[in-house]
């Protein structure tokens, strides 16, 4: 019959089997790492399309530039919120961080719809052109979302669905900002609706799939 082990010896044995865990970088640093990937994509697009046409559109329609800036701020804040929510003990209120940038993005994009009436000479997106925007945003959101999920798998998000929503919003906003580099026409109602649909699809897919992928970190 084996000798009964004391609690002290059991604790000592378990302690000897523990392996050190590498501490995660702070959320702001991981956000910068993800933004570096976005910057690489932007650099490739700028190398291919150039920046002159984008700058001309911004000068002619400052509201488009403001919408692009709002998308960038939304992407940064949503990514930061996602990484912060991956830290145990952080409040769900971090999910509100992207709201100001999102409001600016939506309102400024809505003002762009007035180009259909105020600027009849501007080239307005047709249905097939607007659908290209949807494909662009979703296509770029997939690798950006996958990267965020991979970076968060080592974390412990106690609210995986909310974290996944932030991942989707960050990826979609960054993709919409990247689209500005090669966007060749004015913002009309069809274009705005397509952008909103693409963002909604990305956020929903992340909420459904990303939340499940992040849950194993809780085990």
Image: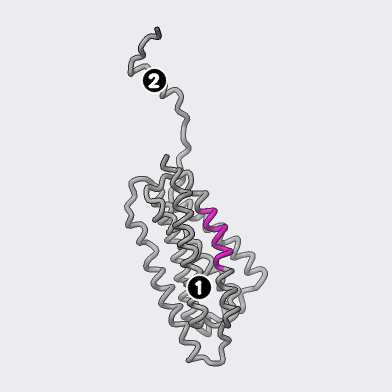
The residue tagged 2 is: 12
Horizontal and vertical percent position of residue 62:
48, 81
In primary-sequence order, the first of circles 1 and 2 is 2
Colour pattern of the rendering: one colour
Horizontal and vertical percent position of residue 40:
60, 60
Q: Is residue 84 above or below residue 104?
A: above
Q: Distance between the residues labelled 1 and 2?
A: 58 Å
The residue tagged 1 is: 195
Name the residue rendered at 52%, 78% in the picture: 191
Report the magenta residues as a range.
Answer: 137-148
Figure disc tally: 2
Overall secondary structure of the magenta stretch?
Answer: helix
Name the residue rendered at 64%, 73% in the picture: 50
Residue closest to the eye, 76 or 132:
132
Q: Quadrant of the N terminus?
A: top left
Horizontal and vertical percent position of residue 66:
46, 76
Name the residue rendered at 42%, 61% in the picture: 77
How crowded pointer 2 is (Cα within 10 Å; few <14, some 14-19, many 20+) is rated as few
Instruction: Locate residue 69 relative to residue 93 in the image: left or right.
Output: right
> For numbered disc 2, what is the local secondary structure?
helix
């Amino acid at each position: 019959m084996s000798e009964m082990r004391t609690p002290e010896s059991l604790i000592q044995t378990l302690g000897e089997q523990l392996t050190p865990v590498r501490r995660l970088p702070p959320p702001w640093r991981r956000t910068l790492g993800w933004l570096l990937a976005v910057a690489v994509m932007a650099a490739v697009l700028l190398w291919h399309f150039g920046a002159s046409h984008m700058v001309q559109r911004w000068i002619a329609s400052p509201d488009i530039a403001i919408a692009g800036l709002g998308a960038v701020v939304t992407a940064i804040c949503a990514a930061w919120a996602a990484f912060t929510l991956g830290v145990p003990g952080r409040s769900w209120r971090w999910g509100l961080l992207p709201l100001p940038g999102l409001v600016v993005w939506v309102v400024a994009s809505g003002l762009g719809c007035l180009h259909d009436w105020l600027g009849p000479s501007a080239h307005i997106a047709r249905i097939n052109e607007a659908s290209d925007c949807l494909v662009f945003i979703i296509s770029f959101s997939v690798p950006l979302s996958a990267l965020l999920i991979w970076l968060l798998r080592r974390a412990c998000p106690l609210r995986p669905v909310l974290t996944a929503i932030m991942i989707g919003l960050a990826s979609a906003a960054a993709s919409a900002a990247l689209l500005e580099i090669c966007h060749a026409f004015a913002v009309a109602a069809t274009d705005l609706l397509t952008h909103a649909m693409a963002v909604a699809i990305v956020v929903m897919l992340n909420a459904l799939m990303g939340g499940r992928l992040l849950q194993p970190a809780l085990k």
